[in-house]
Amino acid sequence: MEISKEQINDVTVLSPKGKLNVTTVADLEKEFEKCFEDGVKKLVVDCLELEYISSAGLRALLAAAKQLKKSNGTIVLSSLSANVKQVFEISGFTSIFPIHASKDEAVKSF
């Protein structure tokens, strides 16, 4: 899995590409850890190029949200494809995470 990282003002944006499942989730978790170590408080996960997410991926996002909340931070999601959005809806995660149509909207939401 490829994960690109960019900084837009005081917002960190992670953009995973490919499939987020049990074999690739460690890559995303490492990026989250780097963000926590760097003191990131505003995090966007842009899912534009995310093709699939499994329960392992959902757990990683939930763990990151809990970690950020401890330090008064927030995680926001953007650009969910129909397939990925369906997984979020079925799992009830749409009520846990703020979800925006685009990366720009997500960044502006802070």
Image: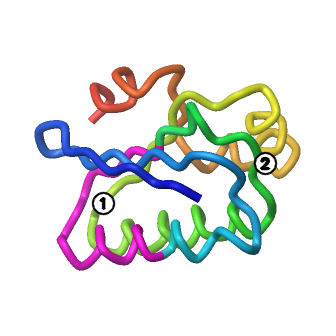
The C terminus lies in quadrant = top left
The three-letter code of the residue at mark 1 reads Gly
What is the magenta range?
A: 30-45
Q: Determine which of the numbered discs, if any, sits on residue 92 in the image.
A: 2
The N terminus lies in quadrant = bottom right
User: How far across and down, in percent of the image, does residue 18 sit?
Assistant: 66, 47
Q: Is residue 43 magenta?
A: yes
Residue 50 figure quarter: top right
Is the residue 27 above or below the residue 105 in the image? below
Q: Secondary structure at mark 1?
A: loop
Residue 62 figure quarter: bottom right
Q: Are marks 1 and 2 in contact (CB under 8 Å)?
A: no
- The tally of labels here is 2
- Mark closer to the chain start, 1 or 2: 1
Q: Secondary structure at mark 2?
A: loop
User: How far across and down, in percent of the image, does residue 59 sit?
Assistant: 68, 69
Is the residue 81 above or below the residue 11 in the image? above
Question: How many angstroms separate mark 1 from mark 2 (CA)?
Answer: 21 Å
Kindly identify the residue that appears in the image at 82 percent across and 44 percent down.
87
User: How far across and down, in percent of the image, does residue 60 sit?
Assistant: 60, 69
The three-letter code of the residue at mark 2 reads Gly
Residue indicated by mark 1: 73
Kindly identify the residue that appears in the image at 71 percent across and 49 percent down.
93
Nearest the eye: 2 or 54: 2
